[in-house]
Image: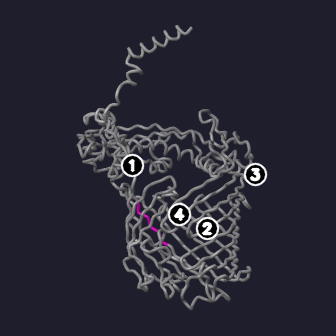
Amino acid sequence: MIFRASLGLWLLTWTLWTWGGVLPLWAAEPPSREAAEPPPSLQVLQVRFIRFSGVKSFREAELKEILDTSEKGRLGWLRSAPLDEEVLDEDVRRVEKFYLSRGFYHARVASRRVTPLEGRDVRIDIEVEEGPPMMVRRVLLEVNGRTEGPWCEEIYPRLPLQPSMRFTTRKYRDCEKSVLGYLAQWGYPKGKVDLRARLSKDANEGEVFVKVETGPICFFGPVTVEGSKKVREEVVLREVTFQPGERFDGLKVRESQRNLLDLQLFQFVDLDVRGLETDAVDLPVRILLKEGKKQTIRAGAGYGTEEEFRGRVEWEMRNFLGDGRRLRVNARASFIEQIVESDFLQPYFPWESSSMTVGGGFRHESQRSYENEKFYIVSRLNYALRDDLTLYAGHNLESNRLVDVDLEDDEFPVVDRENEQYYVSSLMQGLSWIRVDDPLDPRDGLQFFQNLEWATVGLGSEVDYVKLTLEGRKYFPLDKWGVLALRAKWGGIRQLENTDAVPIFKRFFSGGSNSVRGYPYQRLGDAVDQEGEPVGGLTLLEGNVDWRFPLPFPRSLEGVLFFDFGNVFEDSFHLLWDNLRYTVGCGIRYPTRVGPLRLDVGYQINPPDLPDEASFNRYQIHFSIGQAF
């Protein structure tokens, strides 16, 4: 037995030695560092920059987005961007396809060069010859065999391609989608579109032919629900905006799907309209659902120049006690405020288009001029006038205690006394109109907010006042030049009945990263004490103009130039545009999933005349998450 084992071990050793296996590796000396590194000719080149020339109709950043070849940019030490010649050849073809799909049938990449820089870094230069674009000479529309009539008058303006427009593949395909969507909206979901185009590369002109058959008028059939296990079917059906027997409307199908997704009870929602391929005019609808998790716990942290370090923890329970109710508890803290609160949502109360929310909690504020502790309960009735327009009314009950008031002025000791309790009972009313493409980073649309609060002794309040705020925002897309964003805000307070002055925690403050960015947080305003510290005002006026534009490098960043103005006035409901403070500045945005990271630098054009101990730098730097507005 021992002899057989020794023989087997000897054969194994001889085999490994013969084939250059393990034993030579044990015996060999480790290679030198010079021998381990490949010669410079075999090292992988790194793309430092990609440059385009001859590009006139598009932004250079748009072309870089379609490339598989990436660039290191000026922060080259933070990333790797290896050069692959085969990938670069494919990118060249991809650029030509990009131009072709956008109507440039003569466009071509004239040359591409790889220029050595320092070390292994190279620069890629791509020269493009765009040529003339293909233009639409005329669009011929025929509906049910007729080229005139009500159908043609309604459909023709909705076609994405019109005469004198540049012919693009996307708009050509969207012609069919636009027509079918319009027909489905008016009860004709079985419509058909025959789309053709005749293009002349010599004349750079084209003709588009759209032939439409509306088909029969259809109606909604029975509605069935599948996949709903813990959520009652009644909760699902009440979000459906159509009833069996109604005339078919494609918009109502999409609205119903959006309503179900907004419940946050389902991971997947699909409304399947059946019978489109048959002769039936009553079309059944199957709602297919996949339920999501009933509870969610979220946590996050961040940093900003005003709040400094901040954190948040939130627990949410959906379908709480059934019927689509929602309960949410959250706690968040920063160097400015600490909050623990909860809110409860009762949908469809008392009417179909309304809901009720009840919330309350504790808030501790450490502002520049005061420190306040507040317990509060807020109940609101919300009514959706439209999908983008909501009206609310409610009641606010709160107990405030001013822990500290850091003011050096004899005009404010009566109302702003430390360790004094202030009970406020007020009625609230508000309106919000939100129509934007992206809530986290709007680039098109508008927003309007109106809030009114009336506190009176008739409701048990110890402080009587009326407070009104109005705010509007508008976003203008500028195509390749970015976005022009405008904002204006006005607010006013007036004390009523037996109240001599409005408490400091209800007055207006301004200045900071989300208002007038040339000033520190809450340091803008004519209402200051003897030391120049803000005491808050009774009228607020703010305005902002932002030009947000893409930067050529790196492609992920966005630049901002802004002009802000505003002030806080001591008198109530000040309506004059006088004595305003103006600031200008610039900034950088970096997109993230929770909104853009923001860095702004503001400069005061006409700073106020303050005591030396209260003065501050005319340049202000702000860092935060999310757009200023």
Q: Identify which residue, 273 or 405, lies in the foreground.
A: 405
Q: CA–CA distance between discs 2 and 3?
A: 32 Å
Q: Identify which residue, 211 or 44, lies in the foreground.
A: 44
Question: Regarding mark 2 in the picture, which secondary structure is present there?
Answer: strand
- Residue 265 coordinates in the image, percent (x, y): 67, 48
Nearest to N terminus: mark 2 or mark 3: 3
* Quadrant that contains the N terminus: top right
Q: Is residue 330 above or below residue 129?
A: below
Q: Quadrant of residue 351?
A: bottom right
Dot 1 amino acid type: Gln
Nearest to N terminus: mark 2 or mark 4: 4
Dot 2 amino acid type: Gln
Left or right: residue 460 compared with residue 30: right
Residue bearing mark 4: 309
Q: Is residue 274 above or below residue 431?
A: above
Q: Indicate which disc residue 322 carries.
A: 3
Q: Indicate which disc residue 107 carries.
A: none
Q: Does the magenta stretch include residue 486?
A: yes
Q: CA–CA distance between discs 1 and 3?
A: 51 Å
Q: Identify which residue, 154 or 460, lies in the foreground.
A: 460
Q: Identify which residue, 82 or 288, lies in the foreground.
A: 82
Please identify the dominant SS of the magenta region: strand
Q: In this view, does 380 lie above or below 180?
A: below
Nearest to N terminus: mark 1 or mark 3: 1
Nearest to N terminus: mark 3 or mark 4: 4
